[in-house]
Amino acid sequence: MSIELTHASPHFNRRPKGVVPRLIVLHATAGKSDAGDLSWMQSPESKVSYHRLFGRQGGVYTLVDYAHRAWHAGVSSWKGVPDCNSYSIGLAFANRHDGTEALTPIQIAMMKAEVQSIRQEWPNIEVVTHAMVSPGRKTDPDHSPGFDLAMYQSY
């Protein structure tokens, strides 16, 4: 699945040879605006990227092609396998994940559509949160009002 890079981030590299995505990691940003989040992910000093960012008003920003390894999960593991970045797709809501900002209906709808689209290519891909792959270190997007993980896992 090749995607057009609308806001390319420099923070990516190749996936290990033969590795395909088998995990979707959902995130929420900490920024106060979509533009601020995009600027940070394009900044050389951030060392952070997602494959796609879902804006508050429905914009979908592509930063890293799914064929590459985005730098979204940091120190992480799932089911005993470390380095989730190598085998996952990172999707983020532009949202202050501290519980003070609700997800917008358009963000929820766009993220649902994206998860469904990804599952067309990789039907057995699992959907988890950043908090699940980095327990004790991250809490997003679990505290974002309006977030319902089960909704994304059910497709």
Image: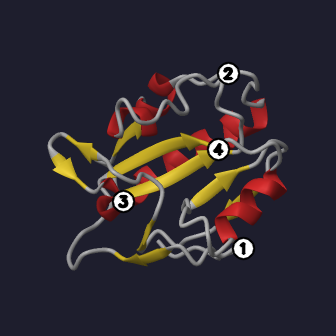
Residue ID for mark 1: 6
Query: Which quadrant, please, contains the C terminus?
Result: top left
Residue 155 shows in this picture: no
Q: CA distance from mark 1 to mark 4?
A: 18 Å
Q: Amino acid at mark 2?
A: Gly
Report if the CB atoms under discs 1 and 3 are less than 8 Å apart: no
Give the percent coordinates (x, y) of residue 26: 50, 42
Crowd around label 2: few <14 · some 14–19 · many ≥20 (10 Å):
some
Q: In the figure, residue 132 lies in which quadrant?
A: top left
- Residue at 47% from the left image edge and 71% from the top image edge: 1
The alpha-carbon separation of the residues under discs 4 and 2 comes to 12 Å
Left or right, residue 85 beside residue 104: left
Report the residue marked by disc 2: 99
Q: Residue furthest front?
A: 45
Please tell me whether mark 4 sits on a helix, a strand or a loop: loop
Q: Which residue is mark 4?
A: 29
Residue sitting at x 63%, y 25%: 144
Q: Amino acid at mark 4?
A: Thr
Could you tell me how far apart the alpha carbons at marks 4 and 3 are, in whole angstroms?
17 Å
Q: Earlier in the sequence, mark 3 or mark 2?
A: 3
Q: Residue at x 56, y 63 (%)?
A: 49
Q: Few, some or many C-alpha atoms within 10 Å of disc 4 (few <14, some 14-19, many ≥20)?
A: some
Residue at disc 2, secondary structure? loop
Tag 1 secondary structure:
loop
